Every structure is written in structure tokens, then in C-alpha cells.
Image (cartoon, grey):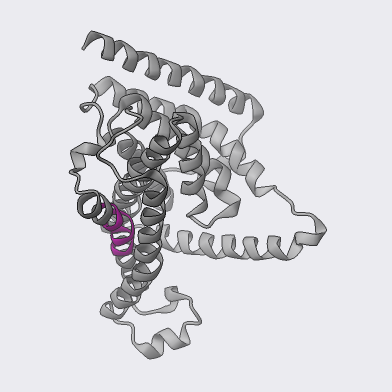
Amino acid sequence: MKLTDSRENPAASSLLIIIGLFLIGFLFLGSVIQILVMMAAGASLTDFMNSDGDFSKLPNAWLGMILGQGLGSFMGFVGTAWLYWKNIEKKSWKDLDFNKVPALPVFGMIVLIQMAFMGFNGWLQEINQGIAFPESMKGLEALLKGMEDKLAETTKFFTDFTSFWQFLLAFLVIAVIAGVGEELIFRGLIMRKLLLGTGNPHIAIWVSAFIFAVIHFQFYGILPRMMLGVLFGYFYLWTGNIRVPIFAHIFNNGLAVTIMYLHNIGIVKTDLESMDDVPMPIVGFSLIATIGLMFLLKNYMLQQKQEN
């Protein structure tokens, strides 16, 4: 990946603009969109007042919430990327790529890497959930756990469906829109600007992955989400094409939605929560396999570059 581009705006000011636009688009406009969609789905102002902030109590709640989430995410992520990249930087989407779309075997390796990584990432989830705060910070711990429980309830509500059309809509919102939008922001823009500012791809990857994890506001999921961001960052660095981390992100989220759907209809007996309890031999094998496959991917891309 290129480290400098004289045609681009400075890294520091660009990062502030990108994060500011995202916060306005996702947190403010996204919330407004969510409420408007819920009202369009049949909720009244009285319903909102009586819900105590629990939108699952509103009429047609699932449809209204998933559509609101989808439109809000599209506005916050894709809208921010479009507004900054196309209107402020005056660039085209193809400028996010440094190489052409890689050959099909690369996407196969991406799938294998993510499958191999699941065991180690499940162990990270266990570690993350077991973090205990000192006595002087128990108030903060209670606050964070309360937020986590609330988000867990929302996630369960989103994924507690058995009809195929609900599965397709959830896949579109949770996998496709989130995968495209989040990668445009965190890898395509934020990682890129960090790379331009620091000249160090590893700093850019890890810092953008940390921001990616923090922005989800789930402390007890920050470690596994950050490590996924690191994977996506190296996918982007080594392939030089934004479609690769987008594909990886869609696959990751889409696999989770699919497993939950299959569990709900009784085809798969194991749910995602039980997948967090991973035996240590599997954790070790998962980590070794992931590292090995990552080296294979890196070497394959270097070989392709030399041949071309």
C-alpha cells in the first residue's frame, strides 16, 4: 500500500473530520432515522412515551427496528464515507484501491483464516467478559455491564426470528450494510489516514482496529472485535483492495446471522453463546493455524506482485 499521496488532505485534520462526520451521521441522524422509521411502522408518540426507551415494546417493533438500524447504519457509515471521500477529498471509490481485485484463491484463504480464527477469538471473548475492575471502579464496571446487557437484549431481539424473509433482511442490515460501511470508514479512510500520517502500516492497522472496537460501545466485546479489525487491516494492507476486507466483514457477520437463524429453526443445535467456551487445545490450534494461513496469504500476494 502506498504510504503517501500528495493529492490527499493532511492526515490529522482528515481524521477529525471523518470521526466528526461519523458521530453526527450515526449517533444523531441515525437516532432520528430510527425514530422516524418506527413511527412509519405504526408507533405513535404515546407509544414512545410509554416504552421507557425499550423500542421492542412498540408496534411492528422488529421490522421498524431492523429497517431503522439499516438506514441509520447506511447514513452513518456509507453516507460519511461518501460525503468525505467524494465531496471533501474529491476522489472516486477506485482511489481506495492500490491493486486490482485479487484472484479467487485469495477470497478462499480469507474464509479459511476467519474459520481458523474463531477458536482463538472465542477465547478472547471469554477473557474480555471475565475482566474485573478494582473496588474503586465498581461503579464504572456496573455501568459498562449495564450497557452490555442492554446491547445483548437488543441483539437477541434482532436475531430472534424464524422466517426466511426476516433472515434475508437481517443479513442485509447486519452483514452487508455493516460490512460495506464499516470497512469504508475504518479501513478505507481511518486506517488509510493513519498510514499517511505515521508512515507505519502496523500502527495504522492496530490503532484503526482499536477505534473500530471502541466505536461499538461494547467494552466486554472490545478484544475480539479489535482483533477482527486487525485481521481486516492486514487483509487490506496485503491485498491493496478494499473489496477484500469488505468481503471478510460480510462473511464474518453473515456467518453469525446464518448460525443464529439455523439455531432458531432447529437445524443447528449449538448457539453462538456456547461457542465462547473453547477448550485450550482448540485455542492453541486456532492461533497457530491463523498465523500460518496469514503468512500464506502474505506470501501469495507477494508472489502475485512479483509475477505481475
Q: Quadrant of residue 296?
A: top left
Residue 257 locus on image (x, y percent): 38, 48
Q: Is residue 306 magenta?
A: no
Q: Quadrant of the C terminus?
A: top left
In this image, 162 relative to 115: left or right?
left
Q: Residue at position x 35%, y 67% from top?
A: 30
The percent coordinates of residue 27 (x first, y second) are 41, 66
Please provide percent x and percent y for residue 235.
37, 29
* Outermost residue, bottom side: 46
- Residue at image position (75%, 60%) is 137
Residue 251 versus residue 165 in the image, above or below:
above
> Image check: 168 left or right of 158?
left
Residue 238, picture quadrant: top left
Q: Nearer the viewer, residue 179 or 273?
A: 179
Apparent side of residue 201 relative to residue 276 in the rendered image (left or right):
left
Which residue is found at the position 17% from the left and 43% from the top? 92
Percent position of residue 205, x then y: 46, 35
The residue lying furthest to the right in this view is: 135
Does residue 74 belong to the magenta stretch? yes
**162 or 52: which is nearer to us?**
52
Which one is in front, 63 or 248?
248
Q: Give the position of the N terminus as an image quadrant.
A: top left
Magenta stretch bounds:
71-81
The prevailing secondary structure element of the residues shown in magenta is helix
The residue lying at 55 percent from left, 65 percent from top is 150
**Residue 100: which quarter of the image?**
top left
